[in-house]
Image (cartoon, rainbow, N blue to C red):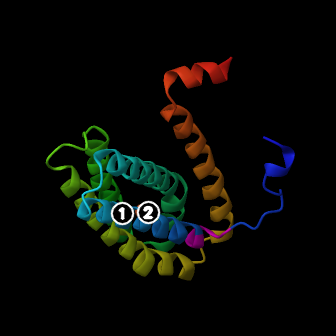
């Protein structure tokens, strides 16, 4: 990689709520892409490729949220019921993601599993955007600092997972 390919050091950082909302939009697009593939009888390979992107995006998003955003928000908004609900929704989504990661696209419940995961995420995203985020803003959570931390953590996780998903041969060659 050349030096000019790096992002400038002074790049604008999104606040946590903007960043998470943008991420929600991206994953929503992926679910829509999958729905179209399922409807148009796209190939199993194409479906699996989109599902892999969905699982990776959700895993990174959820982990960064749980490590950084949720503890700060839980502390600030004093609404354990809302935060506990979000935790349970994350656990439910992770369960379906793990099932999907172990499931071949030929499986007769593959499409249904992706669709149900999408519905769960839709619900969860609405709860966050309509309840949790407004409460966090009102409670003056430092969304600027959290945005920077989230962005950094997401990049780290992306690099780790990208590395983990490369075939063993390629990884060996890289580590030489
Ligand atoms: Fe979430």
Identify the magenta region. 14-18
At a point 62% along the width and 44% down the height, the residue shown is 156
Q: Position of residue 99 (x, y in %)?
A: 25, 43
Q: Residues within 10 Å of mark 2 (few under 14, many from 20)?
A: many
* Magenta portion: prevailing SS class: helix
Query: Residue 44: image x %, image y %?
Result: 28, 46
Q: Which residue is mark 1?
A: 31
Tell me the crowding category of disc 1: few under 14, some 14 to 19, or many 20 or more residues within 10 angstroms, Cα based.
many
Give the structural element (helix, strand or loop) at label 1. Answer: helix
Report ligand 1 position as a quadrant: bottom left
Q: Which residue is mark 2?
A: 27
Frontmost residue, 163 versus 49? 49
Q: Is residue 124 visible?
A: yes
Residue drawn where x is 63% and y is 20% of the image:
173
Task: Give the structural element (helix, strand or loop) at label 2.
Answer: helix
The answer to the question of whether label 1 and label 2 lie on touching residues, with beta carbons closer than 8 A, is yes
Q: Quadrant of the C terminus?
A: top right
The image quadrant that residue 130 belongs to is: bottom left
Quarter-wise, where is residue 41 in the image?
Answer: bottom left
- At horizontal 39% and vertical 70% (from top left) the residue drawn is 125
């Amino acid at each position: 990689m050349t030096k000019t390919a790096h992002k400038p050091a002074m790049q604008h950082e999104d606040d946590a709520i903007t960043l998470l909302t943008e991420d929600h939009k991206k994953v929503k697009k992926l679910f829509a892409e999958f729905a179209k593939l399922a409807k148009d009888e796209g190939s199993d390979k194409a479906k699996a490729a989109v599902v892999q992107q969905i699982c990776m995006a959700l895993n990174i998003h959820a982990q960064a949220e749980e490590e950084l955003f949720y503890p700060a928000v839980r502390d600030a908004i004093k609404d354990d019921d809302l935060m506990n609900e979000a935790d349970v929704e994350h656990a439910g989504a992770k369960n379906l993601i793990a099932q999907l990661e172990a499931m071949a696209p030929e499986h007769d419940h593959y499409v249904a599993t992706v669709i149900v995961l999408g519905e769960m995420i839709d619900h969860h995203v609405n709860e966050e955007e309509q309840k949790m985020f407004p409460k966090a803003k009102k409670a003056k959570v430092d969304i600027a600092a959290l945005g920077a931390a989230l962005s950094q953590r997401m990049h780290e996780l992306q690099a780790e997972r990208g590395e983990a998903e490369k075939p063993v041969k390629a990884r060996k060659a890289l580590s030489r």
